Amino acid sequence: MKRAIHAFLLSAAVFMMSHAVLEAADAPPQPAKGEEKKAPADAKPAPAGAGQPEEGEPSPAEKVPAPPAEEKKTTWLDMVKISGDMRLIYDRIEYPGWTPEVPDRDRLRFRARLGVDVKVCEEIDIKFRAASAESRDIGRGGANITVNQTMTGGWSKKGVWIDIAQVAFKVPMPDGFPSLGFVGGKMEQPWTCPGKSDLIWDPDVTPEGIILKTAYKALGGDLEAKAFTGVFVVMESVTKAESLMLAFQASAKLTMLEGMLSVCAGIGTFDFTAARGRDVFDYSGTNNSYGNSTVGTKYMYDYNEIELFLEVAGDLEAGGKKIPYSVYGDYVINVAGGVGENRGWLVGVTVGGDVKFTYNYRSMGKDAIVSAFNDWDSWGGGTDAAGHKIAVTIKVLKNFSVDLLYIVAEKSISDASVANRDYSRFIVMATVSF
């Protein structure tokens, strides 16, 4: 072994010495120290200005190409983005007079979310988010329409659940062609909600399935059209057919007046398969239909929902400042056979920037939608109700905001025998995000 090492070191030394000798042989002879380089005897003197670049001609230094810039190496830190938020909530609910056994309720709550977005490559993106959520029945997971936790339970440890776990694939397309991509897993809502409407979907709902989506821009980007279609698993079953939701939505947005005005319109369908005759979709395990018609604990009707929506948005000029605004409407109808109270609608307006005011009014028929997934704040979630929602959002700091929310509604609007349907709710939320 020692002989091999010695031979290797000797060979390396000989190689370096021979390399140095060859470089010295190739180099031009240098004048001795103190001796100036002399021109040949028969050399003619150079004319004045010789060796200087002519006017307009780059100097020799300028002719030397700049060394290539070092290519920045991509690290895992460049691929990963971390985000999240923490929210503290005060929630007061005043229940209808026809439920005297349920007292008005005051409670403190919180919401915590932490997400990671990893851009694996130009074509693949992975998103994961964990969130707080209450669970009322072990084995069914956390609540599907809220990630708020109530401060209670003798300081018991609170649950953290998988809120988002999705992978997105972007199909490489030639320039000028519509974009094309797939998303699969427990995902962010892929549908467009005008004015952030929660008529059909609570903002905290994260559906599970796979979708194909596309988008296209024209007129220099002023016209944007997009669409998606997908299959979502609502309830898997071993003994009967799975309950799925087949979804499609298409929308177009036209921006005008140099960005001062935009109009967005769209249509969507949400078809729940095998809903009629199966147990209601209740994460708590208490067989609560949240307003939908039932026979015992099973749905009485199918739910084939069609949605139409319109939103007009832009900026108002006031005191030299631009104030954003949005006016919107959302309409849904259940076209399944035999359904009576099958319509729901919402109209609303939002005005402001750092201080934002929102008002909307909504009415939801008893069987217009599947009641397990719409807004939880309005009248406690579900259908068969109507009411007003007023909200003020104040941006206190860059990543800190305060929301004030007041709801006045009537429940059980389809039952004329109910004398007092009033329901009111007041919510204060302080949110820090990063």
Image: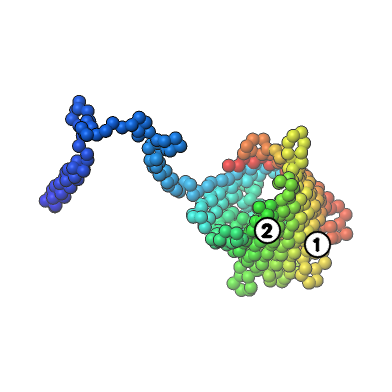
Q: Measuring from the top left, give residue 403's x and y in whole percent.
A: 71, 41
Q: Measuring from the top left, give residue 268's x and y in whole percent.
A: 71, 62
Query: Exactly how many numbered labels are in the figure?
Result: 2
Q: Which residue is mark 1?
A: 343
Q: Badge 2: how crowded within 10 Å, few (<14), some, or many (20+)?
A: some
Of the residues shown, which amino acid type is indicated by label 2?
Ala
Residue 376 makes an appearance in the image: no
Residue 401 makes an appearance in the image: yes
In front of the other: label 1 or label 2? 2
Residue 429: numbered disc? none
Q: Measuring from the top left, give residue 27's x and y in whole percent.
A: 22, 40
Q: Tell me the element at label 2.
A: strand
Q: Measuring from the top left, give residue 404's x and y in whole percent.
A: 73, 41
Q: Tell me the element at label 1.
A: strand
Residue 225: numbered disc? 2
Q: Say above or below: 174 vs 237.
A: above
Q: Quadrant of residue 40?
A: top left
Name the one closer to the observer, 103 or 262: 262
Residue at 58% x, 45% y is: 84
Q: Give the left or right position of residue 221, taking residue 292 as reference.
A: left
Name the one closer to the observer, 117 or 245: 117
Q: How is the image coloured?
A: rainbow
Residue at 22% x, 39% y is: 28
- Dot 1 or dot 2: first in sequence order is 2
Q: Give the left or right position of residue 63, taking residue 256 as reference.
A: left
